[in-house]
Image (spheres, grey):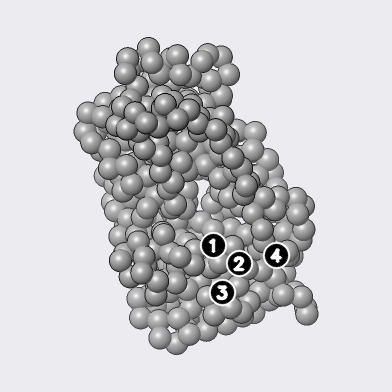
Amino acid sequence: MLTKAAVTLAKGEPFHLTDIQIGAPKSGEVLVKIAGTGICHTDLVVRDAQFPVTFPIVLGHEGSGIVEKVGQGVTSVQPGDHVVLTFSSCGTCKNCQNGQSYACVNFFHLNFGGNMSDGTKRLSVGDTDISSFFGQSSFSHYAIASERNIVKVSKDVPIEILGPLGCGIQTGCGAVINKLKAEPGSSMVVFGCGSVGLSAIMAGKVVGCTTIIAVDIHDSRLKLAEELGATHTINSSESDSLVEIQKITNLGVNYSLETSGRPEVLRQAVDCLASLGTCAVIGVPPIGTEVSLDIKTIRQERTITGVVEGSSQPQVFIPQMIELYKQGKLPFDKLISFYKLEEINQATEDAKNGTAIKPVIMFQ
């Protein structure tokens, strides 16, 4: 079938709107009519070829929508179900079988390799194959996904706002709740108040952190951070973050989260920790980026850990986040700015310059 999509033709090029051919769902796959899809920093990193991918490609990996058709063997959803699309995993490696699909040993290949899980493509224009992304390519009116990377959700929340739960919001919330397991009364600092960082702040409030420090260079984002649960804010373009954090905490924080992908910020996120503290590394710099650390800091029983997709099992965690939203405890809709597909290039610029926290493309 034909569908309209935003195609990235080559490194760094603007999104190009065109009609593409999308194949029928094969065994274990689902055709979804997309209602909304978030734009994530990772989409822009891949567009600019800071991760190796094959062009042309349809990006988008935070889709939500309604099941249109299911392939052979699919039993968890049926046409008409509301679903959120998330990351791909193989389901057969040791980590997947242990319920840790976020650490799938085939994660990079399945999500960045350009093919569906069976090694073939579903998208094309004429005789030209188009690469897929994260097993969904949701910058399109329709998307093919695997049954493994879709999550059935309730129909009592607007489906068009749920896409970012598949990656950005899941990553920020999950880093605090699933990975760090922050305790009530603990302290945390979040470097970077984009959608991931602000989601981490909301999660910190949910779990009962009593000191939540937000660091960013945009006052507008810091103001929103306060609305969402930050107890202190620091504009790092105006003052020394480490000095200010020390003033607030005396001994440093129990937890820090680095979401910017900048090596110098990661250094600060480690240096601000109290003894026994943990730094969660979430930001996505270009592959090959190196960082320097003071070994004295590490020797003082501090921990640095990477976080992928919030260390989440999406089929469990995404419904949990929706319940928190319905209870008013996780107001992630405050992060969202809506755009039409035709405005996708403007949306990416607004995300880059800080005027939009989480752009979501609406499909109507």
Q: Which element type, helix, strand or loop, lies under badge 1?
A: helix
Q: Earlier in the sequence, mark 2 or mark 4?
A: 4
* Proximity of marks 4 and 1: CB atoms separated by less than 8 Å: no
Looking at the rendered structure, the kind of residue marked 2 is: Gly
Q: Which mark is residue 54?
A: 4
Percent of width and height locating residue 130? 70, 70
The residue wearing badge 1 is 108
Instruction: Give the distance between the C-alpha atoms of the residues marked 4 and 3, in whole angstroms.
Output: 13 Å
Q: Earlier in the sequence, mark 4 or mark 3?
A: 4
Looking at the rendered structure, the kind of residue marked 4 is: Thr
Looking at the rendered structure, the kind of residue marked 1 is: Phe
Residue ranking furthest to the bottom:
72
Q: Left or right of 251: which side holds 289?
A: right
The residue wearing badge 2 is 113
Percent of width and height locating residue 139? 61, 60
Residue ranking furthest to the left:
184
The residue wearing badge 3 is 116
Residue 188 appears in the picture as rendered: no
